[in-house]
């Protein structure tokens, strides 16, 4: 079923098709969601379990096979780049593509061909997205959309959803150069309306967890700061990833670990802190966040299942403080949004989202407090950051399916 937003975007896509000079009659539209991680942010590359939901900020892509071997794509978000037009037999290699959004369709074709998928059929496409530029996984949403579309127009399927996740991660890791884990791809690809998605890396399993409360009683809110973070490869995220790997390398032989999530007991935590706290205090601070976030994770999951949103919000807030003070991954605009949210009665918890530095924060809010939160942000945020007065947004999110195909025109 198409939403009113889908119908409005479909008209926008039609307009952009005319601007690009692409004939899109007979197209379909693939819609891929954003995600809202409830735990553990930055846990994927550290080996923790993960939990989150798909949210209704999307990338929409109208597409149709074009009977050639060329990809022709136009983005309504980056109209200055014009029409991207490339042959499937002329995809530039990693590190040679222009530094623009076009790296993603190039990367999708490159990774699929590298992994042995035969691409003979190109497609024409018009894209538009309203996912904030950092924090809600715009790049993962785009990667999944492109990979699924290339598979559809070329008539092949994947063995399971985790193969799509792995290919989308490879696009970012191996082609874009972003050191992302799998959290974003998992939480988008497997997202199901009204459900939380629980991922266990031990067996790569997905479990859907219904909310044990009336979903209308609370809201998940995106607090888009209006800032745009460069790719993860250019951000503090990449530094934190390296730091966590550094501590694992230092401690793996002596303490028998392969990732930070392996440190589960107070005794092992204190032993590692005693061994490396003086020489590598910043690495131990990163461990402190992962250790405590991993333990809070199970409290949050149980609270979600029994419908205790106050507890979910409390854990979300505690994670935010840990991300700010121990993981040192947040940014001033992100924390300004959190500081404002924290003053509003009915806001149960708030923290930065995603890779850090810039982008969006998020909040878990009682339904009746959304308007008060929006009013507080409208009053206070432009005073602190007047340069973003016409760019920030407060968006009350619905929990939605991650991938859906809807009628085109």
Image (cartoon, rainbow, N blue to C red):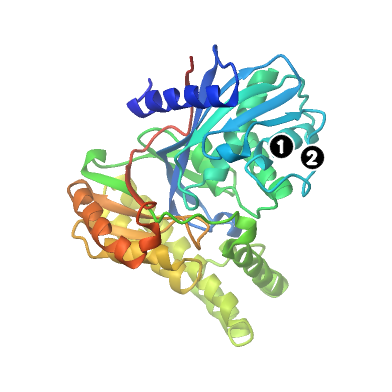
Q: Which mark is residue 92?
A: 2
Q: Is residue 134 left or right of residue 161?
A: left
- Res. 360 image quadrant: bottom left
Residue at the far right: name it: 89
Q: Nearer the viewer, residue 7 or 338?
A: 7
Q: Position of residue 42 (x, y in %)?
A: 53, 58
Earlier-in-chain disc, 2 versus 1? 2
Please give the name of the residue rendered at 53% of the width and 79% of the height, measured from the top-left corner.
270
Reading the image, the residue beneath label 1 is: 106
Q: CA distance from mark 2 to mark 1?
A: 7 Å
Q: Nearer the viewer, residue 276 or 369?
A: 369
Q: Nearer the viewer, residue 405 or 268?
A: 405
- The quadrant of the picture occupied by the N terminus is top left
Quick one: label 1, few (<14), some, or many (20+) residues within 10 Å? many
Q: Is residue 158 visible?
A: no
Local secondary structure at mark 2:
loop
Please give the name of the residue rendered at 47% of the width and 52% of the height, measured from the top-left corner.
135
Q: Position of residue 223 (x, y in %)?
A: 36, 53
Residue at the far bottom: name it: 278
Q: Is residue 132 visible?
A: yes
């Amino acid at each position: 079923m198409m939403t009113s937003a889908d119908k409005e975007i479909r008209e926008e896509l039609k307009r952009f098709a005319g601007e690009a000079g692409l004939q899109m009659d007979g197209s379909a539209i693939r819609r891929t969601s954003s995600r809202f991680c409830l735990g553990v942010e930055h846990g994927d590359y550290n080996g923790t379990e993960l939990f989150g939901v798909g949210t209704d900020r999307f990338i929409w892509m109208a597409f149709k096979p074009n009977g050639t071997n060329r990809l022709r794509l136009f983005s309504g978000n980056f109209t200055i780049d014009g029409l991207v037009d490339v042959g499937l037999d002329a995809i530039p290699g990693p590190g040679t593509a222009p530094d623009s959004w076009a790296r993603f369709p190039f990367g999708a074709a490159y990774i699929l061909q590298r992994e042995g998928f035969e691409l003979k059929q190109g497609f024409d496409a018009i894209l538009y997205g309203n996912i904030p530029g950092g924090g809600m996984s715009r790049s993962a949403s785009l990667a999944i959309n492109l990979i699924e579309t290339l598979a559809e127009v070329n008539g092949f399927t994947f063995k399971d959803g985790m193969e799509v996740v792995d290919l989308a991660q490879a696009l970012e890791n191996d082609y874009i150069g972003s050191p992302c884990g799998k959290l974003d791809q998992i939480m988008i690809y497997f997202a199901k309306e009204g459900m939380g998605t629980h991922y266990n890396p031990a067996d790569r399993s997905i479990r859907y967890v219904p909310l044990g409360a009336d979903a209308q009683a609370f809201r998940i809110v995106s607090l888009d700061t209006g800032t745009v973070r460069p790719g993860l490869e250019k951000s503090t995220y990449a530094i934190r990833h390296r730091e966590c790997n550094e501590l694992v390398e230092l401690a793996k032989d002596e303490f028998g670990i392969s990732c930070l999530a392996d440190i589960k007991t107070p005794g092992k935590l204190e032993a590692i802190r005693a061994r490396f706290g003086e020489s590598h205090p910043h690495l131990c601070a990163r461990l402190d966040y992962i250790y405590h976030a991993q333990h809070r994770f199970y409290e949050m999951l149980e609270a979600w299942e029994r419908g205790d949103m106050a507890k979910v919000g409390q854990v979300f807030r505690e994670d935010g403080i840990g991300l700010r003070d121990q993981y040192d991954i947040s940014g001033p605009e992100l924390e300004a949004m959190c500081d404002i949210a924290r003053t509003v009665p009915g806001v149960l918890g708030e923290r930065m989202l995603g890779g850090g530095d810039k982008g969006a924060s998020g909040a878990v809010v009682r339904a009746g407090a959304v308007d008060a939160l929006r009013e507080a942000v409208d009053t206070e945020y432009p005073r602190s950051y007047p340069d973003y007065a016409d760019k920030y947004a407060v968006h009350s999110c619905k929990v939605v399916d991650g991938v859906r195909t809807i009628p085109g025109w």
